[in-house]
Image (tube, grey):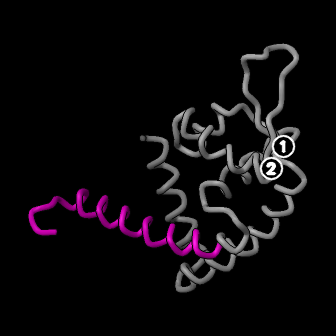
Amino acid sequence: MEGMSSNARLLATLWRTTTCISKKIDTKLSLHGINFTEFLAMLYLAGQKEKQARRIDLAEYIGVTASGITRMLAPMEKIGLVQKEKKARDARVSIVKLTESGERILAEALVSIHEVADSIFAGFHPEESDNIQSKLVALLRTT
């Protein structure tokens, strides 16, 4: 990475690290029939009132476009992890809701996520993890 600034090297390392971690997570989550992006969507929905959210809010949280979230949710709807909800007051609002089956898969997947996280960050002290977490959250706010 010769000729790159310190920040550019950090960016490249962060990207490579994220890619490697994503592969490990997706491999583990494939046992549950989902990938990490689907897991994040289910986790977000589980934390919302009535376990539902507008598709556009979910897309923003995941970091994809509205059409990207639609493509992602289609197979999840097909296998019953999420379902479309209609709003009586405004039919234009597209709502997605986590199903009971989705909640069950999410609970099982959380066990796997904890296993992956514990193996990846085994050498970290809790304070180090908290420090990295806060710095990454700060980065998210600037992007």
Q: Residue at x 48, y 56 (%)?
A: 136
**Amino acid at the residue labelled 1:** Lys
Q: Residues within 10 Å of mark 2 (few under 14, many from 20)?
A: some
From the viewer's perspective, tell me whether residue 105 is left or right of residue 126: right
Q: In the displayed orientation, state which residue is furthest to the left.
A: 3
Q: Is residue 13 above or below residue 61?
A: below
Image coordinates for residue 49, horizontal then vertical, percent: 85, 38
The quadrant of the rendering that contains the C terminus is: top left
Q: Which mark is residue 20?
A: none
From the viewer's perspective, tell me whether residue 30 is left or right of residue 132: right
| Range drawn in magenta | 1-28
Q: Residues within 10 Å of mark 1 (few under 14, many from 20)?
A: some
Q: Residue at x 50, y 71 (%)?
A: 23
Q: Which is more N-terminal, label 1 or label 2? A: 2
Q: Quadrant of residue 29?
A: bottom right
Magenta region's main secondary structure? helix
Q: Quadrant of residue 111?
A: bottom right
Q: In the displayed orientation, state which residue is furthest to the top.
A: 89
**Front position in the image: 70 or 11:** 70
**Number of numbered callouts drawn:** 2
The reply to whether the C-beta atoms of the residues labelled 2 and 1 are less than 8 Å apart is: yes
Image coordinates for residue 118, horizontal then vertical, percent: 63, 80
Q: Which mark is residue 51?
A: 1
Q: Residue at x 68, y 43 (%)?
A: 74
Image coordinates for residue 102, horizontal then vertical, percent: 82, 55
Residue wearing tag 2: 46
**Front position in the image: 140 or 85:** 85
Image coordinates for residue 138, horizontal then vertical, percent: 48, 49
Q: Residue at x 44, y 49 (%)?
A: 139
Q: Circle 1 — which element?
A: helix
Residue 96 counted in the magenta span: no
